[in-house]
Structure formats: C-alpha cells, structure tokens
Amino acid sequence: KQEVTQIPAALSVPEGENLVLNCSFTDSAIYNLQWFRQDPGKGLTSLLLIQSSQREQTSGRLNASLDKSSGRSTLYIAASQPGDSATYLCAVNLNAGNMLTFGGGTRLMVKP
Amino acid sequence: GAVVSQHPSWVICKSGTSVKIECRSLDFQATTMFWYRQFPKQSLMLMATSNEGSKATYEQGVEKDKFLINHASLTLSTLTVTSAHPEDSSFYICSARPLRGRSTGELFFGEGSRLTVL
C-alpha cells in the first residue's frame, strides 16, 4: 500500500526566504505526482504535475522535483511571500486511474 | 484552466436528515469524479470513485448506503449523505479528471463543501 509522508508538518519563515517542502512515498512505481495548495476551509488548487518520466516542473517561483528511485519529491518556493501561506499537499497517482494518495500536508506560514 | 464547482459550500442540518452535495465540471467533461473527505487538520481520504453511467466504487470502510453517489452526466456527480449524524460532519471535496487530460492524469478539485450535522 502506497504511503505518502510530508516533512515538515508545519513551517514558519520570514518573508523573502527560499524554502523546500519534502514529500516521500513508499512505492516508486508511480504514474505521476501532483502538488496542491489548500487555503483554510477551501478546496485544492493544483500547482504542479510531474509525470513519472520527468525530473522537475517549474511554474513561476515554484519548482518541483521528482526522484522516483528514492521515492522523493521536493517543492521549492523562491522568495516566499505572505500570500504563500497555506497548506501544501503532495499526492501520488499510481496509475492512470487517478486514485490519488495524499500526504499529510505542510502548513506554511510566511511572516511579513 | 479547468474549473470544478461544488454546491453548497456550507450546509448545516439536523441529525437524521439527508444532504445532497453537487460537483460540477464547468468547462470540461469528466467521465470520472472522485469524492474525498477531510477532517480538521488532516489530509484527504478517498471515499469513492464515481464513473459516469455506472455504479460508484467505494473505498474500504465507506458505507455505500450511507454515502450515495450518482454520476448521471459527464459534468455532474452528486454525493448524498443519508440520515446524517454528527460524526458525518466533515469537509467533502470532489475532483474530476478531464477527458482531454486522460494522458496527463491531472486532476482538478472543487472548493469543498463543509457539512455540519447538529
């Protein structure tokens, strides 16, 4: 059974810092991995999708990497802003059927 | 981008009543939608997979008679919590996979529906 772990569970940083969120998964035979953002009481916003054949994806200040062999993905946020404060979730998709397994999330607070 | 809408966003009901939550894909068709449940400060747990025109597939431990799922069209899936009780209070989120996105596997999520059962 696929298990997804995110470290740290919570993170507080001053504005402007670069930061890294970690995601690890136990079964390396994944189809893709997706990073989401969730604001309190809201749904999920898709940030980046990395296919199993890819090593990284970039969108603006966000960069996500994938190392299947070690079962790890990282989300790098450059020059963090208070508006980045949210919970970040990674989710692993084992096959094209899209049954996602979610990590516990990292609650990020960026202080002005 | 693809938009998924849920309605209602908030619902408060008395114990014993049934509540229907709608999930709509607004600008794309989705043969498959997924229903998740999220408890406070916890991650999402998949409840069931909803396939257009066929019965939903429920995850282990989820009562299909308690959580009725209907996926009557390519843009609408509904989750009905029957005879709701306080322990059913939770945040319910749906997601949909666009037909065009079948090769990428990207999923899009609704804004969630918070159910409070008194």
Image (spheres, grey):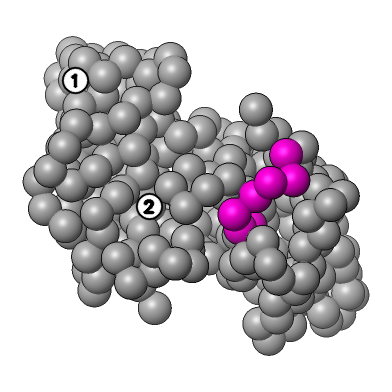
Q: Is residue A19 visible?
A: yes
Q: How many marks?
A: 2
The extreme bottom residue here reads A60
Identify the residue shown where x is 26% and y is 19%: B64
First to last magenta residue range:
A27-33
Q: CA distance from mark 2 to mark 1?
A: 21 Å
Write down the residue under mark 2.
B95
Identify the residue shown where x is 89% and y is 75%: A17
Identify the residue shown where x is 25% and y is 70%: B28
Asked if marks 2 and 1 touch (Cβ < 8 Å), the reply is no
Q: Position of residue B54 (x, y in %)?
A: 16, 37
User: In the shown orientation, is residue B52 left or right of residue A43?
Assistant: left
Q: Is residue A87 visible?
A: no
- Camera-side residue of B107 and B40: B107
Kindly state the secondary structure of the residue where label 2 is placed: strand
Q: Position of residue A26 (x, y in %)?
A: 77, 37
Q: Chain of mark 1?
A: B
Q: Which disc, if any, is residue B82?
A: 1
- Camera-side residue of A8 and B74: B74
Label 1 packing within 10 angstroms: few (<14), some (14-19), many (20+): some
- Does the stretch in magenta take in A31? yes
By secondary structure, the bulk of the magenta-drawn segment is best described as loop
User: In the shown orientation, is residue B51 left or right of residue A109?
Assistant: left
